[in-house]
Every structure is written in structure tokens, then in C-alpha cells.
Amino acid sequence: MGLTGQSKESSTFERTLFPEGTYDMTLDKAIVMMGKPSQYAPEGAPKIMFVWKWVDEDGTEFELTDYLGFPKNMKWNEKSAFWKRAGEIAGQAFTNENAGLLDLDLGEFIQSYAELVEHISSVNDQGRPEKIEVKSLTVNKVEMLGVQRRLVVGVWDNGEKQGNEIAKVMQIAAAQKPVKPTRQAAPAPAQAAAPAQQAPRTPARTAPAPKGNEFPVSPSEAVDLPF
């Protein structure tokens, strides 16, 4: 059984180490695969990898991957890193009541969690584990693939190698919470003998422009993914 529209396993991007900081990135794609066996999942468990794209000032493209556990049966779980990240991307906190707003399209051949597990547990013609590229990820019918977000990026170090981790995903230039206006008393009528003085005007505060990338040094140290 094949899948239509499946992406190539090779990547045209370099795997690099981003210095700690904040970056504006684009959610380029998402891929579902089987994770490596662990003490909690001896046969492995489904994982989802969000791939973020960042372009430096010279136009060079880099990618940053966010590797998360895939929720079993797509059930909402308050401890799930996937649901937390999906909420950050969408700018909306998920709960048990609104989890149905998220829709993940894995192609016409994958219509259930069981079919997903069966497929990514198999191998392709080259003997490599199968992967599925997400066709669409919508929240309340709004497509999340292709959106731009501001990522807080950290660095992990296990003593042997280093890698990146995403501490938080934020909206870019989110609108400020509106401030309730206050009613002012009507000005007293001016007296004929002395013209009313005009009250001094308070200078309007201009909101600072959103900060862009503040990292002139391009990431250059290649590392392996933590999976």
C-alpha cells in the first residue's frame, strides 16, 4: 500500500546548531514516524517532527526540528507536549472541550490511528522505516503549515554532543489587549472675559517595531538529531 504525495527522506537543508536566542521561523512541514524503542515503549511509539525553516540575512536556509510524542488515538492529554506545542503554534490553549478544533490530514490512506501505526511500523523498498508527511494541520479550519512564529531556542548538552530544543513558540506581533476607555467630564464653558486656555496635549506613545532576528552569526555547527 503506497501513499500519495510522500516527501523524499533526504533534506536539502543543513543540520546546524543555533545559538541560544529568539528567531522568527516558518513552520515548513511536519512528519510522523516511529520513535526508537524505550523502557516505556519497547517497540517504539509514534512521534511527530515539526520542521521549522529559518533564513539568514544572506538568504541561506536552515532548519530546526521539534521532535514530539504523537498523542495516542489523537486524544487530548494535559501533559502532552504535542498538545502544548500545537496550542502555542495556533495561539490557543487546547482543552478536553476544544480538542476537536485540531484536524491532522495524513492522506487518504491513513484514516485511523491503527492505520498510522501499521504504516510507520513497516519499511520501504530501501529497507528504511516508513514516514508520513502531514498534508495539512488545521486548527479551527486555519492552516498551520506555512505560518511564521517567534521561537525561543535553547541548547542542550549531554557531554558528548549538543543540540537545539525549542523552549517556546510565540505569536509574532500579537495585538495588545485593548484598554477600556475612560469617560472624561465635559469641559466647562469658556468665560467671555478670559478665553479658555487649551490643555497641553500628551504626546502619543509609539509602540516599538517588532524585533527581528538579532543573531548576525549564522549557525554553522552540524549536529545529529536527538533521535
Image (cartoon, helix red, strand yellow):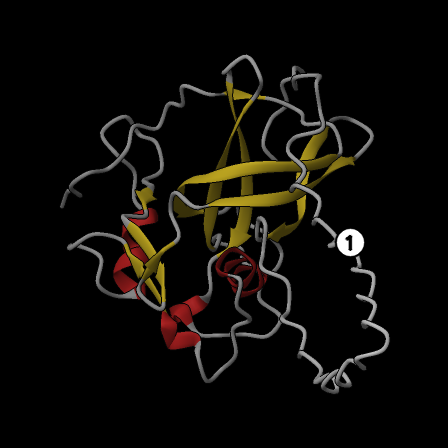
Query: Looking at the figure, which quarter contains the C terminus?
Result: top right
Q: Dot 1: few (<14), some (14–19), or many (≥20) neighbours within 10 Å?
A: few
Q: Residue at x 78, y 60 (%)?
A: 201
Q: Secondary structure at mark 1?
A: loop
Q: Residue 191's x, y, as percent? A: 81, 82
Q: Residue at x 38, y 47 (%)?
A: 145
Residue at the limit of the structure toward the top, as seen here: 58
Q: Quadrant of residue 81?
A: bottom right
Q: Residue at x 59, y 50 (%)?
A: 173
- Left/right placement of residue 61 relative to residue 206 reads left
Residue toward you, 111 or 124? 111
Number of marks: 1
Residue at the limit of the structure toward the front, as seen here: 193
The residue indicated by pointer 1 is 203
- Left/right placement of residue 3 relative to residue 27 reads left
Q: Residue 193's x, y, as percent? A: 85, 78
- In the depicted structure, whether residue 114 falls above or below residue 150: below
Residue toward you, 33 or 220? 220
- Left/right placement of residue 8 relative to residue 27 reads left
> Looking at numbered disc 1 in the image, what kind of residue is underneath it?
Pro
Q: Residue 13's x, y, as percent? A: 46, 21
Q: Residue 135's x, y, as percent? A: 27, 48
